[in-house]
Amino acid sequence: MSPSFGRGAMTNSWQDMGNSQCFLIAGSNCAENHPISMKWINRARAKGAKMIVVDPRFTRTAAQADVYAQIRPGTDIAYLGAMINYYIENKLYDEFYVLNFTNALLKVSKDYKFEDGLFSGFNPETKKYDYSTWAYQLDADNKPIKATSLDDPDCVFQKLKEHFSRYTFDVAAEISGIPADKIKLIADTFAENRPGSILYALGMTQHTTAVQGIRCYAIIQLLLGNIGKAGGGVQALRGEPNVQGSTDMANLIANLPGYLPYPTNAEVTLHDYAVRYGAVQHKPLVALLKAWFGKNATAENDYGYGWLPKNDPTNMPTQVEFFNWMDKGQFKMLFNWGSNSTVSIPDRKMVLRGLSKLEMLVVADVFEIETAQFWREPGVDPKSIQTEVIFLPAAFVYEKAGSMTNSSRLVQWKEKALEPLNGCWPDLDMIDRIFIKMRELLAGSTDPKDEPILKANWDYDDGHGEASPLKVLQELNGYNDNTGQLTASLGEYLNAPIGTVSTGCWIYAGVTPPGKNLADRRNNTDPTGLGLHQEYAYAWPGNIRVLYNRASCDANGQPVDPERKLIWWDAASGTWTGNDNPDVADKTKGPDTPEGKMAFRMTPEGVGRLFAASYTSGVPTSPVPADSIAAIPTRGAGMTVDGPLPEFYEPIESPTTNKLHPNVQNNPCAKIVSTEFGDPEEYPYVLTTYGVCEHFCAGGITRNIPYLNEIMPEPFAEISKNLAKKIGVKDGDKVEISSMRGKVVVRALVTDRLQTLNVNGKETETIGMPWSWGFASLNPGPSTNTVTMAALDPGAGTPEYKCCLVNARRA
Amino acid sequence: MDKDRVVRFSGSARFAHWGHTVTFLVLLFTGLILFSPAVGRVLAPVFGGYVNASTIHKVMAVFFTIIPLIALVINFRGFLDWWKDVFSFGKNDIKFLMKFPLEFFGFKVDLPPQSKFNGGEKMNSVITTTSCVLLALSGYVMWFKDAFSPTLVQWAYPIHGICMILATCMVCMHAYLGSFHPGSGESFWGMWKGTVRSDWAAHHHAKWYEEVTKSQN
Amino acid sequence: MNVTRRTFLKMTGLSVVAVASGLGINLSVAEARAYTLKLEGCTKIPSICHFCSGGCGLLLHIKDGKLVHLEGDPDNPINEGALCPKAASLEQVAYSEVRPKTPLYRAPGAEDWQEISWDEAIERIAKKAVEVRDKTWKSTDEITTKTGEKKIVPANRAEGIAVIGSAEIDNEESYMLSKFSRLIGTPFHEHQARI
Amino acid sequence: MTKRMVFVDTSLCTGCKACSVACKAWNDLPAEKNQLITSYQAQASTTHNTWTYISMHEKYENGKMEWLMFKHQCYHCAEPSCMKACPAEAIYQTDSGYTIIDQNKCIGCGYCVANCPWGVPKTDPELKKTFKCTGCIDRVENGLLPACVATCQPGALHFGEPEEMKQIAEVRLAEVKKDFPKAQLYGDKAMGGTTYLYLLKEEPAFYGLPENPTTSASLVVWKDWVQPYGIWLIPIALGASAVSFVTTRIINSMSKSKGGDIHG
């Protein structure tokens, strides 16, 4: 979503779903995996909202739908492309919105091309694109040239139209297996009932075309004018309790907290970094360095920038690749925190190989998860594994104070309710003690490499020998050197001169103003009835509950939807105001100013991006003095590495050939990690994997909860009645599911909820398997990821769990 | 053998009779606790509460079913004869039954000659036997309810109750007739000692007395 | 069996309490029924669910430092007290018998764990981290600039240490871990947001 | 407390089974060992340790898939068979409409088990006590929602005054009927009207439910005829014997004075 809107976060909130008129739930089984969504979806349905569900299986979500379509896994872009085409051809888009809040009118470079499945700039050797042709036509001030009408053949809108003209309902039907009239019904229902909200989760992201699928959602919502409005939006239903927070905190190789680009070895100095990323990133990095190195971070020493390890762009593995890197011997020691990798990572053989090569594995978790005991998995000889393993038993969520950020960016604080069982430690204390111990071991060292440890600002003692989570949250909030106090608001941080303010994560600035903890607010009043709950906890950024809410207003800054008023321009006081906190660059700049028009202030163009162009705003047209370069307000665009527009590619393992361009079967940029792949002759069925309502992710916790084992006691493979007949399996029999990478034997669940699909004229069977089981716990079972493959989306690095080829036989 | 007396009931028959009497009475009182809450309130404490009462009931039920079975095995012939007799309802038996109520309250009536069992005893035997079998069957259905269809289990309750009532009525009358009714006083000794006075036998069970004396000669 | 007993006790707690009227013990008249709540005397502490990203509010009822009951927090505007089965089951984690009692250590080639103290665990980890850091430290990289020239630049990386963070720990912990790995020299820090 | 009602809108139930877990958590009931039975269902029936569960029903007809859920628990009938059958007077009704087993009085005889038209109560073989849903009477009487209602995220469970519940039910029925012509309310006519009122998308038989449950004839025979009237046969027999005891002796003495004893 970041390439489309400027921020990669769920746009609205759970409560806001109650304002919707229509839901397109595709790539999410929210009734099972985000059950709270059904509370709000049903509130909306009680007011007449429609619910569309597209899923390879008839799920418990589908059982609630007004319209359900069974889709072949991995073919979402085909039918979504057809929807886009239909909306453009039939002018069902919101013209005011498209003209004012999207880049539809901006002219695209004449060098941009799309031919036979490939965009211009592809390098077949590196399997990467050079983005330079995906640019705008720029004027002398480096600003994109705007066409006068949507009919201009160079404008984004025409490029979009041309690109998706190939996606007819019939073509989409052949690819996806959804009948053409059903796709039309979906398109019509979603267009007729606005505001409409799109819900997706791992069903969309776990593909090699993940980012582009989400781009389709963004394009549809921008065309229909559904972004920035109550009841609209694109809801990325994130998988884990604090995955928003852990991403905010940059538990990712290419980021620092607050989504700052991680410095690479090419940015030797802070100055280099500032030149590369502009002031937008420069200032928060300095604030971050001040938080990390305290008094030791000074203007003279580049605020300690040199102490940061630098990324080598040629050596930047993402999570799944980590295990390959271990296997290759680069990593000797792995800290594995609250994550059950041996169950959750695809192609488990590779994972086990990797872990076996380590010198030491440290696992911290509440239960003794499979990852901690990989050396004694059945079939493995422990004596052959030389990895030292240390398991640290962790305190559970209610046994420690701290905050978590939910999917809708709501930072909620909780106090410690119970003493940790068995004297387990909160993870905070583990990290704290390990660091302090390392600092002790290195004390007195004069080796420059030990400086970051010795010079670090690291004192979280709560006075009782334990680390204080509040102290950490306050570090995230940051301090203002001028007042010597905690920064009082995001505004105070933004207005403070560079180098005078610290923050561990700038988007959290303002969460703990002096004497307060806004994440701990518990006023749940909702005067508007829109579910904004402005006084409850704290939503980053700046307590905005509906992102891009400027787009809910017309040219005069007044709400277009009188029943769902979020913000408005108050001419009398000359400010943006409203029920929500206005998502505008400057609250005092009216709707007639360039800033006041901007609905998507985090993109360089200030508009929503139908076409994800490569563009950096604020680039000076004349040379500027070297010492002031950091003040240049450049803002780069978030890019989709595999194309400025979404294109349908078959999954890496597919039962058929790409109907649109047989020569470019798969995403040309996909990162392939697994080494073994099957063909449809030998492995004719499509496997899709998922979670069930009763267990959570890799099951490390839920499989140790008797109540949950009672209601979901075993893993299974769901197969259609046709397939069951074909392979001679009855409901309850054992069935063996095998791929090139391995096989598992589970209970067969024969059901009508999976039907044989007609794909490109061929009968195609889908098999569904939950993946939450592993060999340990109170409820052991075979891990589905023995079968799946590691092929990653080039942008997001998500593996294609949702489709691979398998065979099935009676066991 | 005492000349004045004739053997009326074998040892096994008496064992069965008295064994059944005891178990029946215990079953009756422990069962009444569960049959009627009003009774339960009074009687449950006597047996140490409901749970104990029902445990006793179940234990007794086992004896109740085992005793006649044992007797049956020991003296199969006797039982066969008994049943042959009690289930062979003749004209005389009907006449007996018609006139019996008068006899019951002490009026003098001419009773037709009766076999080993008179019409009343026959009726008693038929009703109690059937009730006991039904009581046992319905009781086990209720005890092991999971093994039977819900409808069957549901009907077991009223059947158990009805049989209990019938059997109890019969037992009351039977006990009274067999012990306190002036006309039948001797029959008590028949079941207690096994023998009865010859003259009583000749008067009350002429047909049978004839047969017995014939066979003895 | 313990649990069943507990159940039984609980159930008797639910039974009718016949309250004698002031004048006599006429039960049929004075059959005022009182139901005692097991939550009586508990402190209510709100928390947040540990599963999907909904952020549903939990409410823990604590008495004498013990968890008596856990249910949805009716005052949390996200879930208004409602919980899915996973969240509703969370009280079973608090006293789970399968939760490890101490840190565990598995020596190379060993077939089982051995229990170790927290101090020993921390020390072993810290020493190993220092050792691997020393052993695999990469202070410089050679890069090719846009103009094609080769250049030696600082890298400052502990190449041999990787960190898989977690989306299941608190913001503060997540941030600390993020800071920790970069301070000890490893940018190789990822987590399950990827998958 | 005045009459209360729970409206179970099965059309909104997602089959997440949180109600079952929340019930166990509140009532401290242990988990049971299970296997999948059909669909995603692993609980086969109510047990002494499972007072509510969801059954799942799949139906594929004319290219349209339906996956229907049904929440089982005690219906808390207005005229409860269990209470009628209970010999120990352990089952009582509250003003709020709940049928409760008083565990101090329960003797685990299982009469209620056999006579519930839905087979809800179950006896714990070890404790010799019969258990079933209490309607969370302890919560309700203290101003809390029943545990299952409180936890239901999709909003399939409603709790309140009967009139209000019936109103919601009628509105929902009209809505659901548009797509499911066989949709109907269930419970309002059963057993004098149940405290748990259901909206079904299909006819009751589809869920394996009795179409029109009433107090069984056997229970009527037992409790309305045999127990109150039949039992009088025993005193009558005893009475007759007593009368006979007297009359026989009177007549005997009379005839003795007339001339000798014929019997004896």
Image: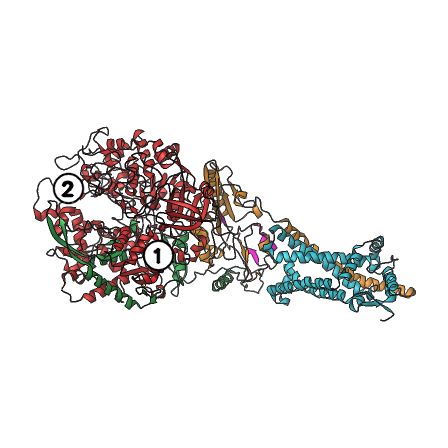
Chain colours: A red, B cyan, C green, D orange
Residue A618 numbered mark, or none: 2
Q: In which quarter of the image is residue B138?
A: bottom right
Quick check: do tags 1 and 2 share a chain?
no
Q: Give the range drawn in magenta.
A: D68-92
**Dot 1 corresponds to which residue?**
C47
Mark-to-mark CA distance, 1 and 2: 44 Å
Q: In which quarter of the image is the C terminus of chain D?
A: bottom right
User: Is residue A240 at all visible to an observer of this figure?
Assistant: no
Report the side of B165 relative to A555 (left or right): right
Horizontal and vertical percent for residue C175?
Answer: 25, 56
Q: Nearer the viewer, residue B104 or A535?
A: B104
Q: How crowded is mark 2: few (under 14 residues within 10 Å), some or many (20 or more)?
A: some
Q: What residue type is labelled 2?
A: Gly
| SS assignment at label 2 | loop
Q: Is residue A613 above or below residue C145?
A: above
- Which residue is farthest bottom? B2
Which of discs 1 and 2 lies nearer the camera? The answer is 2
Q: Which amino acid does label 1 sit on?
A: Ser
Q: Which of A240 and A127 is in front in this view?
A: A127
Horizontal and vertical percent for residue A34?
Answer: 37, 48
